[in-house]
């Protein structure tokens, strides 16, 4: 049997077994990742390990490319300084402790480095699978998490380059670092000098756009191979070259996303196939890696975010996205195994830790709000967080005012409407990147989380005339609707079904972006505040907008 037959046989087996198990997951509404890993365990006996290692490397490379296409470089600039600092500090602290601990137990320096990298870096691939939102508007914690993951991915690329230059090469080749930097410079050049011109000429042709993206990915991987660099360096650089830049990359990203459905099973199933029966030494490594990844990394990131001025919920929700072993760590371990520079028990431990933490991440992703509430109830967040009062300025005795939350999602229009009526305003915001704008435009403001009762006490909920929430997060809208008291509340809802449910609860009205703009919402709120319309009429308008949108080409 030739190599081509072996690859086709492996792919056929992967997709056949995975499809059968995913039917079970779909019928029971279960997370798919454990079933991918189970499929890998089942087929691991039928496929040679060398083929599995090759498939895993190529699967990682293309998935890293797909992640790179989703990186919002503009958003990274807005939170970049904080994200870079937090990502670097967390990686250095955890990695340093892991390396020191491994050396203390007699592990050789190179394997100690592999161990430290596995403990320090978290996975952008697994995290972004549940950070994306259909609405295209991401909450603060998702934006910060993506920036931190991007920083840690860059650290992973540097580690890969360093190992290629000084460990895997027959002789040290420091020039490879310069070549790697040149590859990223080329990617940025393509992005800022050529990408816009090319995509505008293609005029949204989805098939040509997909071919263009794949060609670019293969081209950068080929350049990396020609320069004796790891293929993952070329894949990541290619992703940066076509990273999200609305509207130019919209069609490209939409078409390339279809590749994810092809490479995701290959990657996760091959990881499952690489799992081996652990030795006592492997179990020891695994326990430490799992504890560092599930507990230490989120704890350090949450602490740093709290001390950096973020609210408790953002700190917790961001930290929970760093609770899994990075695909870069796994890729490094695979390359090291091929180069015969990593101890087999450590390699098995990294694979096992990746599987355990990825499964755990599916749980924390589904239950992040509950975990956040559990930690808050037990005072964990309050123990290390800054008090609200340090970033709060509310006039004493303020009454009949409007409370606006989530300023960046359209709150400016509501503020303008209230300002024309000379109505007092209190803005509640939890994003430090926007807080300077809030202080500049509003006389009264509270830095805090809407899920924190103290935030509402400081904002003067009991004496307020109205609460307006334009956050795209359903959990925040529910918190606003469930506030105690008789103060009218208006929330943003992005689903017609949810809008109906909220109007049946305590919400006075809903803002449905599919059918009503932020400017129109401001007009309606102005009419409500001037008593031109009653609360009942306002509720009627809300219901009319989501049941019968004013634009016939929009779906409700």
Image (cartoon, rainbow, N blue to C red):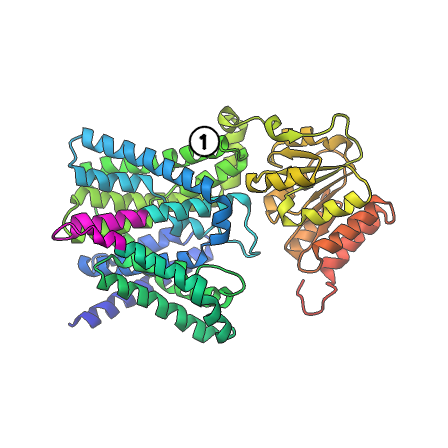
Question: What SS does tag 1 mark?
Answer: helix
In the rendered view, tell whether residue 151 sits above or below residue 184. Answer: above
Where is residue 60, by image quadrant? Answer: bottom left
Placement of the N terminus among the 4 image quadrants: bottom left
Point out the stretch of residues depicted in magenta.
156-178
302 vs 64, left or right, is right
Residue 383 vs residue 358, the one in the foreground: 383
Residue 161: x %, y % from top left: 25, 51
In the rendered view, tell whether residue 386 sits above or below residue 54. Answer: above
Residue 205 seen: no
Placement of the C terminus among the 4 image quadrants: bottom right
Could you tell me which residue is drawn at 31 percent across and 57 percent down? 182
Residue 85 vs residue 18, the one in the foreground: 85
110 vs 216, left or right, is left
Residue bearing mark 1: 303
Residue 540: x %, y % from top left: 80, 53
Could you tell me which residue is drawn at 29 percent across and 68 percent down? 12
Could you tell me which residue is drawn at 18 percent across and 30 percent down? 105
Q: How many marks?
A: 1
Q: Within 10 Å of the Cα at label 1, are there few (<14), some (14-19), or many (20+) other Cα atoms?
A: many
Q: Is residue 175 magenta?
A: yes
């Amino acid at each position: 049997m030739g190599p081509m037959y072996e690859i086709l046989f492996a792919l056929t087996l992967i997709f056949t077994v995975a499809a059968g198990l995913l039917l079970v997951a779909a019928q029971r509404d279960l997370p798919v990742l454990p079933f991918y890993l189970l499929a890998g365990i089942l087929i691991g006996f039928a496929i040679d390990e060398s083929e599995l290692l090759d498939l895993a490397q190529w699967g990682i490379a293309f998935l890293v490319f797909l992640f790179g296409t989703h990186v919002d470089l503009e958003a990274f600039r807005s939170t970049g300084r904080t994200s870079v600092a937090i990502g670097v500090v967390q990686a250095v602290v955890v990695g340093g402790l892991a390396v020191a601990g491994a050396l203390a137990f007699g592990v050789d320096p190179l394997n100690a480095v592999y161990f430290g990298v596995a403990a320090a870096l978290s996975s952008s691939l697994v995290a972004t699978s549940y950070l994306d939102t259909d609405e295209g508007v991401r909450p603060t914690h998702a934006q910060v998490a993506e920036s931190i993951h991007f920083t840690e991915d860059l650290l992973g690329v540097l580690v890969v380059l360093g190992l290629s230059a000084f460990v895997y090469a027959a002789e040290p080749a420091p020039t490879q670092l310069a070549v790697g930097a040149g590859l990223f410079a080329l990617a940025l050049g393509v992005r800022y000098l050529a990408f816009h011109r090319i995509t505008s000429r293609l005029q949204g042709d989805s098939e040509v756009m997909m071919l263009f993206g794949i060609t670019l990915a293969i081209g950068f991987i080929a350049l990396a191979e020609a320069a004796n660099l790891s293929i993952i360096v070329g894949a990541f650089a290619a992703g940066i070259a076509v990273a999200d830049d609305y509207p130019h990359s919209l069609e490209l990203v939409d078409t390339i996303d279809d590749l994810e459905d092809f490479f995701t099973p290959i990657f996760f199933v091959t990881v499952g196939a690489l799992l081996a029966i652990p030795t006592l030494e492997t179990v020891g490594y695994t326990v430490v890696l799992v504890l560092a990844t599930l507990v230490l990394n989120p704890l350090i990131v949450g602490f740093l975010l709290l001390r950096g001025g973020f609210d408790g919920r953002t700190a917790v929700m961001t930290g929970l996205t760093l609770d899994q072993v990075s695909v870069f760590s796994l890729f490094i371990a695979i390359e090291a195994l091929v180069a015969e520079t990593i101890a087999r028990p450590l390699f098995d431990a990294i694979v096992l830790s990746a599987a355990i933490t990825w499964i755990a991440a599916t749980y924390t992703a589904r239950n992040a709000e509950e975990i956040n509430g559990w930690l808050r109830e037990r005072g964990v967040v309050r123990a290390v967080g800054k008090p609200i009062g340090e970033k709060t300025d509310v006039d004493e005795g303020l009454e009949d005012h409007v409370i606006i939350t989530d300023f960046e999602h359209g709150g400016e229009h509501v503020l303008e409407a209230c300002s024309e009526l000379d109505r007092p305003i209190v803005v509640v915001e939890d994003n430090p990147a926007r807080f300077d704008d809030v202080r500049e435009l509003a006389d009264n403001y509270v830095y805090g989380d809407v899920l924190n009762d103290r935030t509402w006490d400081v904002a003067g909920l009991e004496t307020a005339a109205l609460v307006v929430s334009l956050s795209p997060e359903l959990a925040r809208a529910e918190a606003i609707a469930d506030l105690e008291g008789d103060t009218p509340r208006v929330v943003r809802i992005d689903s017609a079904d949810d809008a109906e449910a909220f109007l049946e609860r305590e919400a006075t009205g809903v803002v449905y972006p599919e059918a009503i703009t932020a400017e129109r919402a401001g007009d309606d709120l102005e009419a409500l505040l001037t008593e031109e319309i009653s609360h009942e009429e306002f509720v009627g308008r809300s219901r009319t907008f989501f049941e019968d949108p004013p634009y016939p080409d929009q779906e409700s």
